[in-house]
Image (spheres, grey):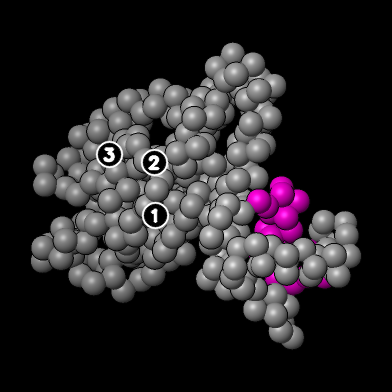
Amino acid sequence: MGSVDLAPQELRTLVAVAEEGGFSAAAARLGTTQSAVSHAVRGIERKLGAILFDRGRHGARPTPAGQRAAAHARRVLRMLDALVADVRGGGGAAAPAGPLRVAAFRSAALHLLPPALERLAARHPGIEPTVTVVREIGPGTAGEVAEGRADLGIATLGTSAPVPPGLLTGVLLEEPYSLVHPAGHPDPRSLPLVDWTENCSSYTRAWWAAQDWLPPATVRAEDDGAVLSMVGSGLGMAVMPALSLTAPPPTVAVTGLGPGRPTRQIGYVTTPELAATAAVRALIRELRAGQSRVTQSTVSDSRKSE
């Protein structure tokens, strides 16, 4: 098959149908008619030589080919936006500007991103960041980048959910896990284990399995904040990473797990094309600038508690 020429409006139509789940809703989003959207999709399918949507009573659902096409379309459209922003900004480092979409899991959005975004705003007020909190389960934040929904993701690296191929990653910090328990409890290791779903994908499971004092988790919480609340209420103990323990409540005590403690890597994920844009480069610089401070503080805190 020769080269395929898809216009930006065709890409926008493809994304709109995939995200809205039907031709009528996509037409309303695009300010056109259902018949125009249907005609455009048929033309795109002819050009690509693949059926992109299953049509039915429930609307139009992307086929596997349609999901891949929509992901590529989002990324191409984002690069067109980045092209305009970089050119208008004088070629990059001088004055990066424009939107910057960030996906982060909860504790990173609460504790890692804010100081970096504050520094970014001070240095580059033309950049307009938006942050989406994504559960680090399954595709997680890296999946948002791969699907073209985010320019950069803050992700847990080295877990059971590998980063999709073709993306660029960089380690920002390695954080230790600690034992978290009710303050003042005489025998915290006798308590039930509290856990949350996002923690289950951690590659520290091999360490967990070797600890005969750690029972299977019998109490489940929605997220790490709920775990801290439950532990603080005396309902159990937990094993949690340092980023989740940035500001623990006074009813919670944090005890180090010694030199053999597990750790996890936190890093950024982006696409090769977006990694070259001024806005993404600027945010990575600010994240790296805060890296040593976070690492020093988490190591210091964990040493105090050992």
In this view of the protein, which residue sits in the foreground, 123 or 190?
123
List x then y, in percent, for residue 107. Answer: 45, 46
Task: Report crowding for label 2: few under 14, some 14 to 19, many 20 or more residues within 10 A (C-alpha).
Answer: some
List x then y, in percent, for residue 104. Answer: 49, 47
Q: Is residue 4 above or below residue 28?
A: above
Which residue matches tag 2?
A: 168
Residue 174: mark in rendering: 3
> Given this view, does label 1 or label 3 mark the residue nearer the observer?
1
Q: Label 3 sits on what residue type?
A: Glu
User: Which callout, 3 or 2, points at the residue further toward the start of the chain?
Assistant: 2
Q: CA distance from mark 1 to mark 2?
A: 9 Å
Is label 2 in a helix, a strand or a loop? strand
In this view of the protein, which residue sits in the foreground, 113 or 258?
113
- Dividing the picture into quarters, in which one does residue 100 lie? top right
The residue at the point 28 percent across, 70 percent down is 217
Is label 1 in a helix, a strand or a loop? loop
User: Which callout, 1 or 3, points at the residue further toward the start of the chain?
Assistant: 1
Task: Report crowding for label 1: few under 14, some 14 to 19, many 20 or more residues within 10 A (C-alpha).
Answer: few
The residue at the point 45 percent across, 29 percent down is 284
**Magenta segment range?**
5-26
Number of numbered discs visible in the structure rendering: 3
**Residue 137: in magenta span:** no
Q: CA distance from mark 3 to mark 2?
A: 18 Å
Q: Label 1 sits on what residue type?
A: Pro
